[in-house]
Amino acid sequence: MLRTAEGWVQPPWSDILRLSADDKHVLVRTRACSHRVRDSLAALAGRLDPERFVRVHRTEVVNLDALVRLEPLGHGDALLTLVDGSTVVASRTYRPELVRRMRGR
């Protein structure tokens, strides 16, 4: 369950595409909509399936099932494209774990 300004919601975890830190909130982006949750990214990420979700940046966690493309950028970063067409930068710090997890799928 996620507590939002509109009330409590329970999106199916499989519908979550990504989580993005936004000041003291996290934007939980699903296939249908976004929910703004007052919680930390680390706290929410800790409740997700570690086989399905991976941290790709200090401000981003993505669903590996939603990933459709990885393009190398300069200095070890990568640009990720998700099924909804949105893009996320994977920093060079988190990229090795992302690539390892993608190969294991």
Image: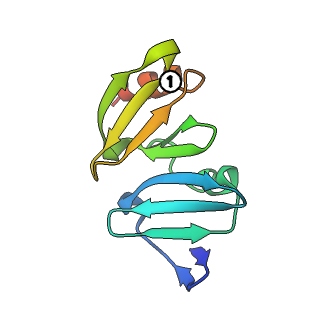
Query: How many discs mark residues in the rendered view?
Result: 1
**x 46%, y 45%: residue:** 62
Residue with the most extreme front position:
74
Q: Residue 48 location in percent, x, y?
A: 54, 53
**Residue 103 visible to an observer of this rendering:** no
Relative to 18, residue 91 above or below: above
Residue 6, above or below 72: below
The crowd level at tag 1 (other Cα within 10 Å; few <14, some 14-19, many 20+) is some
Outermost bottom residue: 7
Picture colour scheme? rainbow
Residue 100 visible, this angle: yes
Q: Can you give x and y, in whole percent of width and height, for residue 103 in the image?
A: 35, 23
Q: Is residue 36 above or below residue 7?
A: above
The C terminus lies in quadrant: top left
The residue sitting at 43% across, 25% down in the picture is 78
Q: Nearer the viewer, residue 50 or 84?
A: 84
Q: Quadrant of the N terminus?
A: bottom right
Q: Is residue 59 above or below residue 74?
A: below
Q: Amino acid at mark 1?
A: Arg
* Residue that badge 1 annotates: 95
Residue 27 sits in quarter: bottom right
Secondary structure state at the residue bearing disc 1: helix
Residue 71 percent location from the top left of the image: 33, 24
In this rendered view, identify the residue nearer to me: 7 or 74: 74
Report which quarter residue 30 is drawn in.
bottom left
Q: At x 63% / y 56%, what residue is drawn?
A: 22
Location of residue 42 in the rendering, given as x and y in whole percent from the top left corner? 68, 49
Q: Is residue 88 left or right of residue 45?
A: left
